[in-house]
Amino acid sequence: MEKQGLELEITELRLGLPGGGDNKINEKKRVFSDISADEANATNDDRKIHTKSQVVGWPPVCSYRKKNSFNEKDRLETSKMYVKVSMDGAPFLRKIDLGMHKGYSDLAMALERLFGCFGISEALKDADGSEFSPIYEDKDGDWMLAGDVPWEMFIESCKRLRIMKGSEAKGFGLQPSGALKGISKNDK
Amino acid sequence: MNYFPDEVIEHVFGFITSHKERNAVSLVCKSWYKIERMSRQRVFIGNCYAISPEGVIARFPELKSLTLKGKPHFADFNLVPHDWGGILYPWIEAFAKSRVGLEELRLKRMVVSDESLELLSKSFVNFKALVLVSCEGFSTDGLAAVAANCRFLRELDLQENEVEDHRGHWISRFPESCTSLVSLNLACLKGEINLSALERLVARSPNLKSLRLSRAVPLDALQKILMRAPQLVDLGTGSFVHDPASDAYNKLKATILKCKSIKSLSGFLEVAPRCLSAIHPICHNLTSLNLSYAPGIHGNDLIKLIQHCRKLERLWILDCIGDKGLGIVASTCKELQELRVFPSDPYGVGNAAVTEEGLVAISAGCPKLHSLLYFCQQMTNAALITVAKNCSNFTRFRLCILDPIRPDPVTMQPLDEGFGAIVQSCKRLRRLSLSGLLTDRVFLYIGMYAEQLEMLSIAFAGDSDKGMLYVLNGCKKLRKLEIRDSPFGDTALLMDVGKYETMRSLWMSSCEVTLGGCKTLAKNRPMLNVEIINEDDQIDFSSDDRQKVGKMYLYRTLVGPRKDAPEFVWTL
């Protein structure tokens, strides 16, 4: 994706007062994104995915509550959950650690980076809104459309991922429940 | 009033109970000051470093109830280093030496050692109530001392403390003769509890009205305890997990039906949603429901529960309720006064979150709402303006957008107009927390309209010193101001140094104030302590006054620089 000079700059969204485009404002305060970028870079290089969560004390949830409400999430974060990911048309499969991601959007961004494409986030939000259909094989061996169930439930049950492309995906006639006709463990 | 004998005036003062009013009364004349101080039983100290314990004892020798607060509010969010201060022991030591008959102690954000608890338990014969909120430094050994020695203990209320658990059976230390308990809150304890000792304690406490259990109390133990205490008004469950087909569960269902007085419910620290139907029968009486530590209750289970709770006045939940769920709250809970929506996934971008839609629905459906804490994905000016129109009764309005500099996603504008509408409409607003993209303009509005504002929290907001100046000049009743990561510097800090003596405290971190500015402020101001928190030796005090100060905390005080400041805290 290359920027083509002026055109894209005008449509680019910025944070700041309208009509300005000044950088003066941003220079005066340490913008949140600067801080979180600093802290993200300072820590683990493996976590290339930029998360705004690294700023100390934000969001302002008291530390007792943080330690006691989110136990499940912390537990899941520390376990490694590597699954194979295949993308139609790509010569090699990849592996991705589901435990490293915070949610579907995060996962979508990571997949887009892995395969050098975009449109996966749209697919997760709206099954018809993209040429991609991200599907996954669950514990029972069924192929499911990704995005229906809460994230924690998804990463517990996902065994492998596949990103189907184009007409092949549409041709299967997706059912509302998300289970795909025509693909089951018997077909593999 | 001078022609009344002192006893009559004292009797009249007995009807004046609020701290503010008693403080006002004491300022009228010397005679009233003297009568008031000799009859004052309840003392509130918002900053434990503003006065010495000896000073308190000298002025209020008849005091029975003391409330003390230690660390600044931002300590809750890990912005204050661990051993900053707020130590209880010197207070207990001083009180123990005096003749004060302390009966109640309420502490917030203080460091409480086992030694101080032990000294407390042995020094005050009539000690009745201990309430610890967000404290640390003690273990179950300290609690054992309180249990064993405070013969007339009525209240032991532990809220959100970090308690080290030494597996002694501290509950068993309550003697058989202890039958006076009214309130017992153990929710924050992490370790094992001697369940039969707890059950016996409850059985011999006929006045027990409030009981909040820890995670270590399973469902079958809950049933046995409830059998002994059907008179409970406030219940916090521990672990609420069982096979719904089991005997234990069915017994619980029957027992709960006998608890007709329960008005307040919390806990569910571990929960199997299929077990929730057991509590539906008591929901219609509930005025207070706290499910903010129960991520296991969500979706339809949560909705079903709330639909039974038509009398709710206070609701604390997680944002997995979603905007739709808040819509159900709005149509069900017409008596709602206080709402807190906490993030269930603060770093995630997943499905669990609320937006401006939920808040608008609540404001439309709940006309009595006056206290709000709302963590959300996004907010719009239009929504805030609507909320301001629907609910002009807010006394506390705390909004936290998870991305703190997010503009209005529809118009891409800062949220100045939205918050401006809130302060203009809510004339009784006392506490405000801001977030989202904000310019100096929002502070102009706050200075103009927020006449009753006492506490303001600012993060990543404003463009220049003007912002802070609008607030300092406009908010005459401001007591606590806390600011992080905003471009306010020495000009704003130094414009009106007298202002800070009318306030309890000011916190500024990651702003533009310099060492020189702080030094100037501290000069010739014996009534202020200006403390710099110098972590990791960021500041070199011998050199450049132009260095920016990472964290500054200043507060008014009668007793000068504190003597217990750790080496990384410099009082200028």
Image: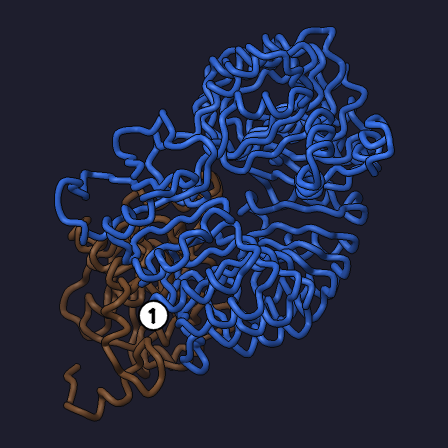
In the rendered view, does B367 fall on the left or right side of B70? right
Parent chain of label 1: B
Question: Residue A162: x and y, percent?
Answer: 29, 66
Q: Is residue B50 visible?
A: yes
Residue extending farthest to the front is B3
Work out whether B552 lies above or below B117.
below
Question: Residue B165: x and y, percent?
Answer: 46, 20
The residue nearer to you, when weighing B202 against A117, is B202
At horizontal 43% and vertical 39% (from top left) the residue drawn is B527
Give the chain ID for the blue colour.
B
Q: How is the structure coloured here? A: by chain
Occupied quadrant, residue B21: top right
Occupied quadrant, residue B563: top left
The residue nearer to you, when weighing B207 against B497, is B497
Question: Residue B479: x and y, percent?
Answer: 52, 50
Work out whether B216 lies above or below B466.
above
At horizontal 24% and vertical 62% (from top left) the residue drawn is A34
Q: Amino acid at mark 1?
A: Asp
Q: Is residue A126 visible?
A: no
Look at the numbered disc 1 and give the secondary structure of its residue.
loop
Question: Residue A67: x and y, percent?
Answer: 43, 39
Give the chain ID for the brown colour.
A
**Crowd rating for badge 1 (residues with CA inside 10 Å; few <14, some 14–19, many 20+):** many
The residue nearer to you, when weighing A106 against B136, is B136
Residue that label 1 marks = B463
The residue nearer to you, when weighing A148 against B372, is B372
At horizontal 51% and vertical 77% (from top left) the residue drawn is B417
In the rendered view, does B469 fall on the left or right side of B565? right
